[in-house]
Image (cartoon, helix red, strand yellow):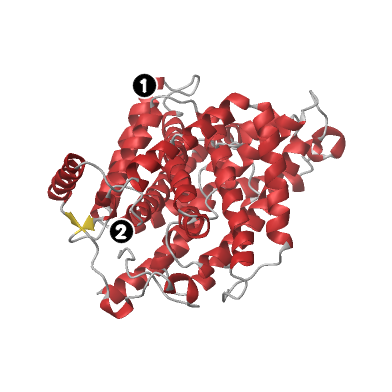
Amino acid sequence: MLKDRRKYACLLACFIIKWNIIGSGIFISPKGVLEHSGSVGLALVVWLLGGCIAALGSLCYAELGVTIPKSGGDYSYVTEIFGGLMGFLLLWSAVLIMYPTTLAVIALTFSSYVLQPVFPNCVPPYMATRMLSATCLLLLTWVNCSSVRMATRIQDAFTVGKLMALGLIIVVGLVQIINGNYEALTPQVAFALDRTPSVGQIALAFLQASFAFSGWNFLNYVTEEVVEPRRKKRGREVMILFYSYHCFVAQTFGEKLLGMFSIIMPISVALSTFGGINGYLFTSSRLCFSGAREGHLPSLLAMIHYKSCTPIPALLVCCTATIVILCIGETHNLINYVSFINYLSYGVTIAGLLFYRWKKPNLYRPIKVNLLVPVCYLMFWALLLGFSLYSEPVVCGVGLVIMLTGVPVYFLGVHWKEKPKCIYNFIEWATYVGQRLCFVVFPQIDPIEVATPSEWTERSSGRSSFSLPV
């Protein structure tokens, strides 16, 4: 049975790449990219360079994923390389900002496109979009709590929606070009600037584009659940480059070119975003699971349902945090928040790759990228974050402050070992109550694959003995 679960997890990992890279961001970000870049031509350049940078980053993460074969992605790598505090800050910002905000943005997009046919001449009501978004989140949380197999089947069905939407855009675009309607793509028109964008505005355009490309690192969150992760990681660069071609706003596109069939686009995007929420819930819960396993989050989050083997407490935490974010933010501001923190964590992780090369030069690495790849990524990363901070100091500053609030939490909750007995008694009681309510236990260790922690990084292959069964 365990062998069947691992086989199923491998298929699931392959779909994670498809679910999250080709997701809903492409139907959200183009507005922000075009607003900040100032022209269609410059926006297309931003999309192309953004795809290339994402491909460089995915190559670096491929090396990290097979060198440090632990689930948890950025968090696990930074913890392994730089220590507990840095890893906890990354985990803290991901749990508080990155995943809840991303899920909130996708859920709001889902509700907006679903309600668009009902309110064709106006923006859907604020409360209606929030209520529908929360309902969608609760439904998919229940699905993921019930069965990984059910979540996978739902995801496969809704993948058809996103591929249909992207395929329709490509075909209609090619038809327009064949018919000679490509005046807007000529350099004179495409690069005609209504205003000259500042360097800071260009940086913000890249941040908006990075939101659409996000998801290329998600396979690293379930490394321990994948057999032969090296083979799975090779597909990401192809997906990213394929994805970089699709840069339109779906609703406007449908109204302009599809006429009476324009309703197809909001339906397709709604299907796409529904599947995107499902994929993000799956990976974000695994991050909470990894953090709890390392002792950086309450141990309850490292437990799984005794029968379905799903991380119910971690899923409930992700759902609750997302619903809170839904009530306090607007879509494009939320994208700026999450993109800045995302890029910050990517840069720290890839800097860790260089440090690990220096720290352990003789460590076996099944995949080893040229040094120019992480160096080029980090140069672009430093310029992008610097200009973004200069252009939007409040948005970026709030993100940094939230991340740094994790410092006292780390020292009080993790580093401080000699806590009063009453605190331990409360934690034990809360864990007991959570176990009774969710019917969860710690995952069973597979005796065939027991390995000491040092073997996680010193062996050329292998998996953690605490891997999450699915």
Give the farthest residue toward the bottom.
Answer: 448
Q: Secondary structure at mark 1?
A: helix
The residue at the point 49 percent across, 19 percent down is: 122
Q: Residue furthest right?
A: 188
Q: Amino acid at mark 1?
A: Met
Q: Residue at x 74, y 35 (%)?
A: 40
Query: Could you say where residue 149 lies in the image, as x and y percent from the top left?
Result: 30, 61
Residue carrying label 1: 127
The answer to whether residue 235 shows anywhere in this view is no
User: What number is the disc on residue 148?
Assistant: 2
| Label 2 residue SS | helix
- Quadrant into which the N terminus falls: bottom left
Q: As shown in the figure, which amino acid type bears the numbered disc 2? A: Val
Residue at left 39%, top 69%? 453
Asked whether, in this view, residue 384 is left or right of residue 109, the answer is right
Could you classify mark 1 by the number of other residues whose Cα lies within 10 Å: few (under 14), some (14-19), or many (20 or more)?
few
Mark seen at residue 50: none
- Residue 163, percent from left and from top: 52, 52
Q: In the shown orientation, is residue 419 left or right of residue 401?
A: left
